[in-house]
Image: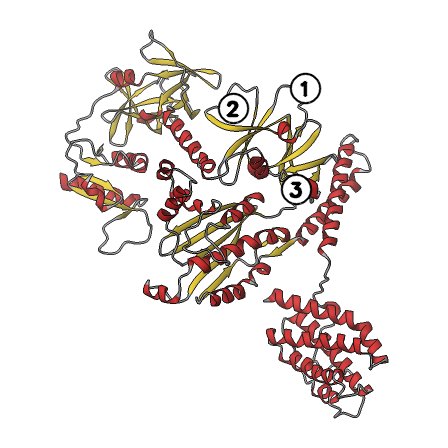
Amino acid sequence: MDDLKAEFVAETQEMVEALSSEIVAWEADPADRSRLDAIFRFVHTVKGNCGFFEFPRLEALSHAAEDVLSEMRAGRREPDRQVVNAVLAIIDRISDITADIASNGSCPEGDDSALVAALNGEGTEEVEETGETGQLIPRANANRTVRLPVELLDRVMSGVSDVVLARNELARFMAELDRDNLLRGPFDRLSAVINEVRDGMTRTRMLPLETLFTSLPRMVRDLAGQLGKRVVIETDGGDVELDREMIEVVRDPIMHLLRNAIDHGIETPDERNAAGKPASGLIKLAARQSGDKIIIEINDDGRGVNTDKLVAKAVSAGVIDEERAAQLTMEERHMLMCEAGLSTADRVTEISGRGVGMDVVRDNVERIGGSLRIDSVVGRGLRVLLQLPLTLSITPAMTIVVGQHTMGVPHSFIEEIIDSANKDVSFEQMGDAWFAKIRDRRMPCVGLNTLLGIAEADNKRRALVVLRLAGGAEFVLTVDKVLAHQELVIKAVSPALLATGLYAGTSLTDDGRPVLLLDVTGIAEAAGIDTGIEGRTRADDKLQREWEEQESRVPAVLFTSLDGTRKALRMSVVSRIEMVEASQLTRSGGRWRVILGDLIVPLAGLDKVPEDGEAIRVLRLGDGNSVLTYACGDDTDVTDLPEDLTPMPGDNEIEAIALIDERPVELLDSHWLFSNFGEARNQDDRPVCRLSAQDSWAQNFLRPVIESAGYRVVDEDDKTEADVAICGDPKESKVLPAGQHIVLRKEEPKRTKSDKSIYRYDRDSLVAALEAARARKA
């Protein structure tokens, strides 16, 4: 509302200033109809606006003036000097009151009866302004605004950008001067001023989203009434600022999503009552800023989307086959709504169509570097999440060279940059299409030179830019050279270039060279890259490959032994790292041992006795049956063992030599260590705790705590009778048989008296429960 008041004040004062010459001319010639009409339109506009803001004093003044001016326009009253003076005095009073509203935010109290009486010819003296409006603040102290054409702001912004480029070019020359040069001080001040001006001009392009939100309640009301529905819209985050050009770009997608929600999402009042919902549907539109992105979320509490029906429609339309349909994740099922021509609506209306038009929404969002996500629960509603960049005017980009031309690629699309000569890169040709294989990823390869018809450089070496579209599809763009990352101030490209669909804008580099910003989505479409559902699922295939690679890796703990040798142990045998004092060391039976709590554990790798007060680090190792420790230095790290290991058959302690970070590392033989140093403990007296082998959190987080409490841990496949089992759901007790079950819940809130579960990170309660179970066994 404050923003609307400020706009009202600015508009009123602007109209008063524009009327100044008209008022003087009308005073000289009251019979001038054109000037009379202009003054009438002013008071009529002020009267209408005052009713909206509840400014009764202004409304009464403008209403009285409007009545008199209306009679003059109809010829029922002659504009004598007293009436003209009264009208002019009212306009002055409106101007003063408006200035006070700008300063204080409210309409001041005052008596305007003398002015109204003068309008009706009831006064005989000349009307004079006597400050009846109260203690009005002079207009010079009020918040002042000015309206400028957007084209003028764009020209000024373009000029500031040119000044910045000139400053950067001058900075390169300044770098060659001596540090004591007298020009450095003025240049630094000039540079700071230019930065301030550029930041200020950038701010002029930003508008609050409230400018978009204000028109939505009326649109929702009218559309719902047209469809016989009752819908309420709630907005949040109207103060979030977005580039004015970006607001215009996302206006249509947001309108389409709202029409979708009202037309096909929200049910009729009868249907909602039958489903146990309020008769009025609710749409929530919220915006928030996250880093350099704006998140816009649209929720409705309607019927949602039946994904089974959507998938069946996609199969029947030939968008995907049945085999691929069975593999779709829930997110991919929802994204089928964005496939061209695919809709689950029983009817297609002129208002909207779920699926019909959603592909345009997605394409428009992705074209500006944004992304779209859809979630839905049948019977409960649908959520659409839009992620957008803050501005279109300044784009982080990687500058590249193609032939003799410098171009830019938006940084948000770049996944990786790699040299074509890299040993992990290979190329394959299938028909007329080329594919690049980078490590284990096989992606379509697009030669930018070929696509744009630009001659290739003589150098056969190319740079490969791996690009990922907002929907997940990936492809490789080959260029002659990659230059550097730059913040490009984007200007509109010529209509001829824009029509190609390959360019998003133009800019200049710091040295003044022209740069064309590539439209990555347009490049993909021109090259025939599949951006539909098949292309989008390649992102999940990539994640699956990464997961398989992770599974095949063998992690190891890399450390320096006390004799200075680089060694490694497989991670699977290392429980944790302990710090022990010299007083905890003891020697018996011809070997070193260390006291850890109530355990005396064998110690390997100790070549000298530490001095009193000196502490050493030890790796605590376990095989599920016995425990031992290995002395190490302070330098420890975690790494993956390479596939190529050199066996050491002549040394029982060393399993192999591995080359890690171009340095040889001795991989200790875990089997030899436990066969020579391990001492099996009596397992019969230890209580048994059962954990699911499939629960990685339990194995990684809980197992050390349980073993520290004196338990032996087994999984669901072990036939040993367990004293206690720990699970995350009481239903798991059937697959984790034990004498007692401890249930760990994920939520932190306090449990009720009837709830015997324990919060998963309440260590004290968990240990106490284990001790109680152990006491019952004893």
Task: Say which residue label 3 marks.
Answer: 499
Q: Is mark 3 on a helix, strand or loop?
A: loop
Q: State the residue position of label 2.
A: 431
- Residue at image coords 49%, 55%: 257
- The residue mark sitting in front, 1 or 3, is 3
Amino acid type, mark 1: Asp
The x and y percentages for residue 302 are 40, 58
Q: Residues within 10 Å of mark 2 (few under 14, many from 20)?
A: few
Task: Kindly state the secondary structure of the residue where label 1 is placed.
Answer: loop
Would you call the spot at circle 3 few (<14 residues within 10 Å), some (14-19), or many (20 or more)? few
Is 409 left or right of 224, judged from the image as shown?
A: right
Q: Is residue 616 above or below residue 777?
A: above
Which image quarter: residue 494?
top right
Question: Which numbered disc flags the more N-terminal residue, 1 or 2?
Answer: 2
Q: How far apart are marks 2 and 3 (CA)?
A: 29 Å
| Earlier-in-chain disc, 2 versus 3 | 2
Q: What residue type is labelled 3?
A: Ala
